[in-house]
Image: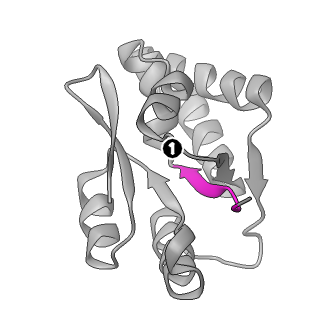
Amino acid sequence: MSSPRRIILDTNFLMVFGLFGVDIVSEVDKACPFLYKLCLLDKTKLELDEIIEKQSGKDKSAAKLAKQLIENKKFAIIDTSDDNDYVDDILVKMAKKDVELTPKIKSIVATNDINLIKRLKEQNVPVLRLRQKKYVVLEE
């Protein structure tokens, strides 16, 4: 049996449900017909807290729903306390390292951030992203 692929959820991807009403868990399931594990960086939770504290309206509501989703689905939390970089930089480093160490079971990053997607693709990191504000696609 093969090891599950790690799908690392970025902050903006977690907010998709609250912003567009898309069930990201079932959409990821449709897009990824293989064994996987959903996880996020500890700093992603901090980013959501910051959005809840400083934003208002849709973004604040979406961040609150994302936090509830994290708690309800019990996503794995990746400890990055020893890394002081920005979340996007950590995601790129982590996924790049996975590509180098385990090319057949690469980590996947789930994000809608155009700049982050570009950086990940330059490193040959697979990306899950929202299309037409309706469904999730995997780009390998």
Q: Quadrant of the C terminus?
A: bottom left
Left or right: 80 as drawn, with respect to 119 = right
Q: Quadrant of residue 74?
A: top right
Q: Which region shows up in magenta? A: 2-9
Q: Nearer the viewer, residue 63 or 5?
A: 5
Q: Residues within 10 Å of mark 1 (few under 14, many from 20)?
A: many
Residue 30 x %, y %: 45, 29
Q: Is residue 52 visible?
A: yes
Look at the picture and state if 71 lies above or below 88.
Answer: above
The dominant secondary structure in magenta is strand
Left or right: 85 as drawn, with respect to 122 = right
Q: Which residue is mark 1?
A: 11
Residue under the point 57% across and 53% down: 8
In the rendered view, how is the structure colored? one colour
Q: Nearer the viewer, residue 130 or 89?
A: 130
Q: Nearer the viewer, residue 21 or 98?
A: 98
Residue under the point 26% across and 77% down: 122
Q: How many marks?
A: 1
**Amino acid of disc 1:** Thr
The question of residue 82 being in magenta is answered with no
Look at the picture and state if 77 lies above or below 27.
Answer: below
- Residue at the extreme front: 1
Residue under the point 60% across and 27% down: 66
Q: Nearer the viewer, residue 116 or 58?
A: 116
Look at the picture and state if 128 lies above or below 99.
Answer: above
The question of residue 3 being in magenta is answered with yes
- Residue at the extreme left: 132
Left or right: 1 as drawn, with respect to 92 = right
Residue under the point 74% across and 40% down: 75
* SS label for mark 1: helix
